[in-house]
Image: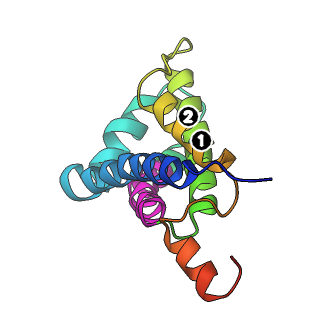
């Protein structure tokens, strides 16, 4: 089966855009807002009336900014991109649950849906078609492509 000649460009654009969305969110949350304020404002204060224990809210609130920063950087450069995209998708599952817990008719059309579609595009692309990634370069050097 042949791969459409535009897949390398589709992969690069979709991967880079979704990676930048996660990376820039992480950079802002870590260096401007700070992880402590992120945890307090968006997790601890936002879920005081829900079943989630405070220790778990703090753990998620502190770790998500760093997680987004690291996963976003990996996605942008295309290093372990498939695993990073899956991890980012699982983060979207967690945050969607949190938003829906706060507001049962949560509007997913904003950041969540855009990121989700971009993740799907890259994950559904033919394996090895992302020629503008570190994964591709490393695999070529190892003789796997």
Which region shows up in magenta? 58-77
Q: Which of marks 1 and 2 is in front?
A: 1
Q: Which of 46 and 23 is in front in this view?
A: 23
Q: How was the colour assigned to the protein in this rendering?
A: rainbow
Q: Which type of secondary structure does the marked residue at label 1 adopt?
A: helix
Residue at (56% x, 23% y) in the render: 101
Whether the residues at callouts 1 and 2 have beta carbons within 8 Å, the answer is yes
Check the image and report above or below for 118 versus 36.
Answer: above
In-image side of 140 versus 73 (left or right): right
From the viewer's perspective, is 121 left or right of 16? right
**Main secondary structure of the magenta stretch:** helix
Task: Classify 28 as above or below 76.
Answer: above
Give neighbour class at mark 2: few <14, some 14-19, many 20+ (Cα, 10 Å): some
The mark tally for this picture is: 2
Q: Which residue lies furthest to the bottom in this view?
A: 142
Q: Nearer the viewer, residue 121 or 84?
A: 121
Q: Residue at x 58, y 51 (%)?
A: 5
What residue does disc 1 label? Answer: 121
Residue toward you, 74 or 129: 129
Query: Is residue 85 placed above or below 73 in the rendered structure?
Result: above
Q: Distance between the residues labelled 1 and 2?
A: 6 Å
Residue 23 position, x and y percent, is 36, 55
In the rendered image, which residue does mark 2 sit on?
117
Q: Does the magenta stretch include residue 12?
A: no
Residue 8 x/y as whole percent: 53, 55
For this orientation, the residue located farthest to the left is 32
Taking the image as shown, residue 45 lies to the left or right of residue 71, namely: left
Side of 118 relative to 20 (left or right): right
Q: Which residue is drawn at 62% across and 59% down?
A: 129
Q: What element carries label 2?
A: helix
């Amino acid at each position: 089966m042949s791969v459409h000649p535009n897949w390398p460009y589709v992969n690069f654009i979709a991967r880079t855009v979704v990676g930048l969305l996660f990376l820039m969110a992480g950079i802002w949350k870590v260096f401007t807002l700070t992880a402590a304020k992120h945890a307090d404002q968006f997790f601890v204060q936002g879920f005081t009336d829900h079943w989630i224990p405070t220790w778990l809210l703090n753990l998620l609130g502190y770790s998500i900014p760093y997680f987004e920063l690291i996963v976003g950087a990996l996605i942008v450069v295309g290093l372990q991109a498939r695993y990073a995209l899956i991890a980012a998708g699982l983060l979207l599952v967690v945050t969607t649950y949190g938003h829906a817990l706060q507001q049962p008719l949560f509007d997913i059309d904003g950041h969540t849906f855009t990121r989700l579609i971009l993740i799907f595009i890259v994950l559904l692309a033919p394996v090895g078609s992302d020629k503008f990634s570190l994964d591709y370069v490393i695999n070529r050097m190892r003789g796997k492509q």
